[in-house]
C-alpha cells in the first residue's frame, strides 16, 4: 500500500478538499513572498482548518483503518505507505497463456443516505465491493485488487475508518487486495453529514475461459442465486416510498422480523468466490449480475443475437421487503421487476447436462440457488412467466 499527498490514499492519507492545495504543498500565494494579497492586510490569515478541512482528522482516520486494510494484502502487494501509487506484483500472469485484464467501477447509490440517517457506516463498504467485483466475475475474471474513493462533507475519523473497514472486509470476502484509495473532505460542496463512496477493481481471466454471450446456447439452463435483499439498487425509489408512506426506519414490520432500517442496510451478497468456484468445476457459459434494470434486463445482456430466455416466477418467493415496498408505494409488478432484483442477485447460465451438478455445488457452498428457466432460440428477449410464490 502506498500513499501520495493529502487526500490520496494509496493508502489512506489525510483528506483533500476541493480547491487549491495548501501552501505546504510547495505553492504559496501569488505575489511577493511575505506580502499579503491586496485588500487583505487587516484580515486574519486563512488556513485549511478554517476552510473546513481537517488534516489531523485524516491522519487519525488512516491510523484507525490501517490494520483492516493490511489484512487484505497478500504477498502480491508491494511496499507500504509513502509512495505515490499502489503496487501489485503481476508475476502470476506469466502463467497464463493469454491473460485478459478486466475492470469494473461502481458505487452504492443512495443507500448511503440510509446509512447516514441511521448513523451506521460499517456495511456500505461491503456493498461497494459487491457491486464492483461481482460485475468483474460475470466474465469469469478473478478480482486482483480494488481501490476506493470516499468523500465527506465534514470528516470524522471514526466514521471514515468505519466505512473503509467495511470495504476492507468486503475485499477479504471477495479474495482481492484493497490496494489504495482516497478519503476526501468537501466542505461547501456536501452537507456536514453527507458522504458518498465509489470504487474500481481489476481482475484477470484466461482468454479461452472468458464467459459471455459467445458461449451461451439455446437449451442452456438459467440458475438463480438468491439475493440477501435489496442489495444496492433502487434506493431512490425506496426512500420515496418511505417518505410518502410516513414509514419510520425504527419500525418493525411483522413481515420483516426486524427494523426497516436494518433490512434496508442488509449487506449486498458478494458472489465472487462462489461464482469462480462454479466456473472452475462446472460448464458455466455466462453470469449475469442482477443490479439496476432487474432480472430480465441484466440476463438479456449475456444472450447472443437471436436467443431469448424464459424465467419462471413460480420457482421462488421474493423476500418480504419487496412486497412491503410495492404495497406502500402502490408500485406495479412491471416496475418492481424493472427496478429491483426481487430475490435474485446473480444468474448463472450453464449447460443443461451440468445444471444438477452446478446446483449441488452451490448448495454445498451455502449459496441458495434453484433452476429458474432456460435459454430459448425464439429471439424474443427475456420473458418472465407465471406467478411468484406467496
Image (cartoon, grey):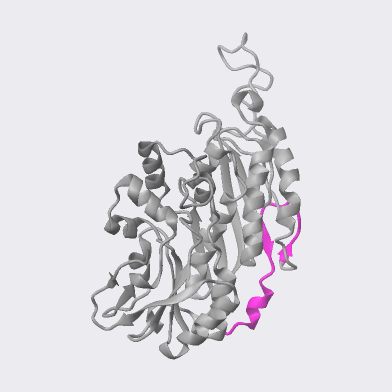
Q: Residue at x 32, y 58 (%)?
A: 338
Residue 240 % position (x, y): 37, 41
Query: Toward the viewer: 17 or 330?
Result: 330
Relative vertical location of residue 302 with respect to residue 320 in this rendering, above or below: below
Residue 293 % position (x, y): 35, 60
- The answer to which image quadrant residue 192 occupies is top right
Give yes or no for residue 85 being in the magenta stretch: yes
Residue 295 % position (x, y): 37, 66
Query: Toward the viewer: 17 or 217?
Result: 217
User: Start and end of the magenta stretch?
Assistant: 77-100
Quadrant where the N terminus sits is bottom right
Q: Work out whether residue 129 can be spotted.
A: yes
Label count reads 0
Q: Is 340 on the left-hand or right-hand side of 382?
A: right
Residue 167 % position (x, y): 62, 54
Q: Residue at x 47, y 88 (%)?
A: 354
Query: Toward the viewer: 387 or 368?
Result: 387
Amino acid at each position: 500500500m502506498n500513499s501520495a499527498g493529502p487526500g490520496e490514499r494509496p493508502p489512506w492519507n489525510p483528506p483533500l478538499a476541493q480547491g487549491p492545495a495548501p501552501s505546504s504543498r510547495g505553492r504559496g500565494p501569488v505575489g511577493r513572498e511575505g506580502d499579503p494579497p491586496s485588500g487583505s492586510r487587516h484580515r486574519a490569515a486563512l488556513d485549511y482548518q478554517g476552510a473546513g478541512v481537517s488534516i489531523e482528522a485524516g491522519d487519525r482516520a488512516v491510523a484507525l483503518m490501517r490494520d483492516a486494510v493490511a489484512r487484505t494484502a497478500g504477498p502480491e502487494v508491494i511496499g507500504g505507505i509513502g509512495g505515490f501509487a499502489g503496487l501489485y506484483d503481476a508475476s502470476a500472469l506469466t502463467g497464463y497463456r493469454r491473460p485478459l485484464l478486466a475492470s469494473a467501477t461502481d458505487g452504492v447509490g443512495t443507500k448511503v443516505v440510509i446509512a447516514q440517517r441511521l448513523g451506521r457506516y460499517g456495511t456500505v463498504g461491503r456493498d461497494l465491493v459487491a457491486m464492483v467485483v461481482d460485475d468483474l466475475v460475470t466474465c469469469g475474471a478473478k478480482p486482483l485488487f480494488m481501490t476506493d474513493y470516499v468523500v465527506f462533507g465534514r470528516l470524522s475519523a471514526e466514521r471514515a475508518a468505519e466505512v473503509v473497514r467495511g470495504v476492507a472486509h468486503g475485499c477479504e470476502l471477495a479474495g482481492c487486495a484493497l490496494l489504495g484509495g482516497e478519503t476526501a473532505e468537501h466542505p461547501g460542496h456536501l452537507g456536514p453529514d453527507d458522504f458518498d463512496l465509489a470504487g474500481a477493481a481489476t481482475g484477470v481471466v484466461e482468454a479461452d475461459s472468458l464467459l459471455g454471450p459467445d458461449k451461451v446456447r439455446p437449451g442452456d439452463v438459467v440458475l438463480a442465486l438468491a439475493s440477501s435483499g435489496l442489495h444496492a439498487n433502487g434506493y431512490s425509489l425506496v426512500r420515496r416510498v418511505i417518505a410518502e408512506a410516513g414509514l419510520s426506519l425504527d419500525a418493525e414490520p411483522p413481515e420483516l422480523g426486524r427494523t426497516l432500517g436494518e433490512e434496508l442496510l442488509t449487506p449486498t451478497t458478494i458472489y465472487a468466490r462462489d461464482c469462480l468456484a462454479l466456473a472452475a468445476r462446472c460448464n458455466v457459459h455466462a453470469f449475469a449480475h442482477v443490479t439496476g434494470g432487474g432480472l430480465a434486463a441484466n440476463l438479456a445482456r449475456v444472450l447472443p443475437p437471436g436467443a431469448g430466455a424464459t424465467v419462471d416466477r413460480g420457482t421462488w418467493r421474493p423476500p418480504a421487503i419487496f412486497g412491503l415496498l410495492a404495497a406502500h408505494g402502490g408500485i406495479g409488478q412491471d416496475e418492481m421487476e424493472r427496478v429491483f432484483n426481487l430475490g435474485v442477485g446473480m444468474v448463472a447460465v450453464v449447460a443443461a447436462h451440468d445444471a444438477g451438478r452446478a446446483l449441488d455445488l452451490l448448495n454445498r457452498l451455502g449459496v441458495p440457488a434453484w433452476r429458474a428457466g432456460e435459454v430459448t432460440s425464439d429471439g424474443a428477449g427475456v420473458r418472465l412467466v407465471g406467478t411468484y410464490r406467496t
